[in-house]
Image (cartoon, rainbow, N blue to C red):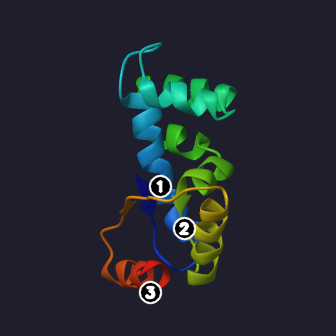
Amino acid sequence: MVRVGGTGERDDGRLSMKAVLALYSGGMGAKGRNFYNDLACRYGYEEEAVEIQDLYLAGKKMEATMAVPDALVDELALIGSKERIADRLDAWRDAGVTTMILSTTDLSTLRTLAELTL
């Protein structure tokens, strides 16, 4: 599932996505038994994933959120302007992605996705 943030400024949607990624890679499982943390490591973010989990499990959720790299958010989510989202969708399409589950709770973002994908 690809989460889609607001279609405004990228930094606006990035923070909320960082909080989600911190929860999943930091708090969804015990140390050494977290699928999402392992996945972040496989994506090349091993040092960051360890730091995020350590912070999250220590109760430092905001620090864990801020430790999520912008690059990881950009790789896993569609956040930013309509043009940026269109560019990212094209890149995934060019890479061979044929099916995506796009997730958003924002009606305006949903309309943008419909324009870009239907």
Image-quadrant location for residue 113: bottom left
Q: Position of residue 77 (x, y in %)?
A: 52, 58
Name which of mark 2 and mark 1 comes first in the sequence: 1
| Residue 32 tag number | none
Q: Position of residue 28 (x, y in %)?
A: 36, 29
The residue beneath circle 2 is 79
71 in relation to 42, above or below:
below
- Density class for disc 1 (Cα within 10 Å; few <14, some 14-19, many ≥20) is many
Do the residues under discs 2 and 1 have CB atoms within 8 angstroms? Answer: yes
Q: Give the left or right position of residue 20, taking residue 9 as reference.
A: left
Do the residues under discs 2 and 3 have CB atoms within 8 angstroms? Answer: no
Q: Give the left or right position of residue 20, taking residue 80 as reference.
A: left
What amino acid type should be assigned to the residue bearing mark 3? Glu
Taking depth in this image into account, of 53 and 29 the one nearest to the observer is 29
Q: CA distance from mark 3 to mark 1?
A: 23 Å
- Quadrant showing the C terminus: bottom left
Q: Residue at x 46, y 78 (%)?
A: 117
Q: Residue at x 37, y 85 (%)?
A: 111
What amino acid type should be assigned to the residue bearing mark 2? Ile
| Residue 115 tag number | 3
Mark 2 or 1: in front is 2
